[in-house]
């Protein structure tokens, strides 16, 4: 890659003059400016945004990266809001990257965040075995994980007890008298999916109900998979009388299918979702759902990251927040 010094040599000027053109700072005559811009184009020179940011008087240089798997998921929007509040109050700015559960895209964004000279990163990793993120932790970059952690890695984590929360939701369905309780779950590579699946199985066993493979569906944690997998469940010779959905996008997909079939909730089929939504009580009927304190998760993650930046040698913390089952009329 060409350097500023290369540009200066090509244009026959000093590095300081190139800098003045790049930063539009100070007087440079038109002929010299044109020569410098021509050299930049010929050499395909790209100014270092990190250096530019650190030189700027208007920005302190404090920058936090945030890596989330799905910006369409309202849960992560609320988490991001909590992070931003803490970051702003501590004079940090954010760079947010959405990798859409795509590991190649996640890898690219992690590389970009590192190239931007971030002070730390808050991430919901693609999997527990996220090699690149583990390497960043090992190299000393301050990292906090949200919603899911990293296996065999000493790292700060903020999440809810997914297994217990799923158990409580399915146990509630069983206590209401439902016998064929299905689950539409997310990607099996995501730790939170695994724990919610475990909670589902434990609740069925606790209530003496069979664990049937035909009632267990896994998709990609997005709305279309909720639509498709709910169709598959309702097409069974003996369809479920209740469905537990693994996140709010899956819930929306399942509701779309149920309403398309003109089924009545909860008489024809009950539904309980993981992740409450601010408009869940406005649905007809209002949705029973597990409420995660998403904004609080973001705030705690932001606080832990700033602590980690200031105290890099402190012991790591796994912070588990409480989720609450919001009992409404869909079950």
Image (cartoon, rainbow, N blue to C red):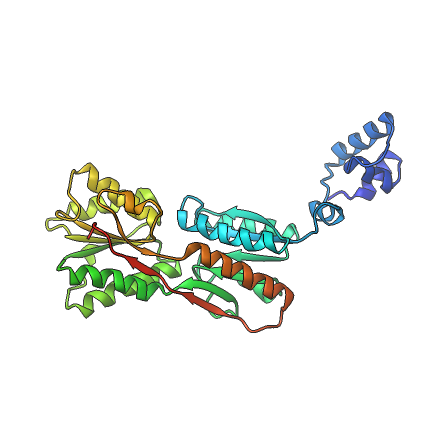
Residue 302 falls left or right of residue 270: right
Is 166 above or below relative to 65?
below
Q: Quarter of the image for the N terminus: give it.
A: top right
Q: Nearer the viewer, residue 142 or 125?
A: 142
Q: Nearer the viewer, residue 304 or 182?
A: 304
Residue 91 falls left or right of residue 99: right
The location of residue 69, given as percent across then percent down, is 45, 50
Q: Nearer the viewer, residue 289 or 105?
A: 289
The location of residue 138, given as percent across then percent down, is 59, 67
Is 89 above or below relative to 137?
above
The location of residue 330, given as percent across then percent down, is 21, 50
Locate residue 291: give its quadrant: bottom left
Is 314 above or below relative to 249?
below
Locate residue 204: give its quadrant: bottom left
Q: Residue at x 29, y 65 (%)?
A: 198
Residue 269 falls left or right of residue 198: left
């Amino acid at each position: 890659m060409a350097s500023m010094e290369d540009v200066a040599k090509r244009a026959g000027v000093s590095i300081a003059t190139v800098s003045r053109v790049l930063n539009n700072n100070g007087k440079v005559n038109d002929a010299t400016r044109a020569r410098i811009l021509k050299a930049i184009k010929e050499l395909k020179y790209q100014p270092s945004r990190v250096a530019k940011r650190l030189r700027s008087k208007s920005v302190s240089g404090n920058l936090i990266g945030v890596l989330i798997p799905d910006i369409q998921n309202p849960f992560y929007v609320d988490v991001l809001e909590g992070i931003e509040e803490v970051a702003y109050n501590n004079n940090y700015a954010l760079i947010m990257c959405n990798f859409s559960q795509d590991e190649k895209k996640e890898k690219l964004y992690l590389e970009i965040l590192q190239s931007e000279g971030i002070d730390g990163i808050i991430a919901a990793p693609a999997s527990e075995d996220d090699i690149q993120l583990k390497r960043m932790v090992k190299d000393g970059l301050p990292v906090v994980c949200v919603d899911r952690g990293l296996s065999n890695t000493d790292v700060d984590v903020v999440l809810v007890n997914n297994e217990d929360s799923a158990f409580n939701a399915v146990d509630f369905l069983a206590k209401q008298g439902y016998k064929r309780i299905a689950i539409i779950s997310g990607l099996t590579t995501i730790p939170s999916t695994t724990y919610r699946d475990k909670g589902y199985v434990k609740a069925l066993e606790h209530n003496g109900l069979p664990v049937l493979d035909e009632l267990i569906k896994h998709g990609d944690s997005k709305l279309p998979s909720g639509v498709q997998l709910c169709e598959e469940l309702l097409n069974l010779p003996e369809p479920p009388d209740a469905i537990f959905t693994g996140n709010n996008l899956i819930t929306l997909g399942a509701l779309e299918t149920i309403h398309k079939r003109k089924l009545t909730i909860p008489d024809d089929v009950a539904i309980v979702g993981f992740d409450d939504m601010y408009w869940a009580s406005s649905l007809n009927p209002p949705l029973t759902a597990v409420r995660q304190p998403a904004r609080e998760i973001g705030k705690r993650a932001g606080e832990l990251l700033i602590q980690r930046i200031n105290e890099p040698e402190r012991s790591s913390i796994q912070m588990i927040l409480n989720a609450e089952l919001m009992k409404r009329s869909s079950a």
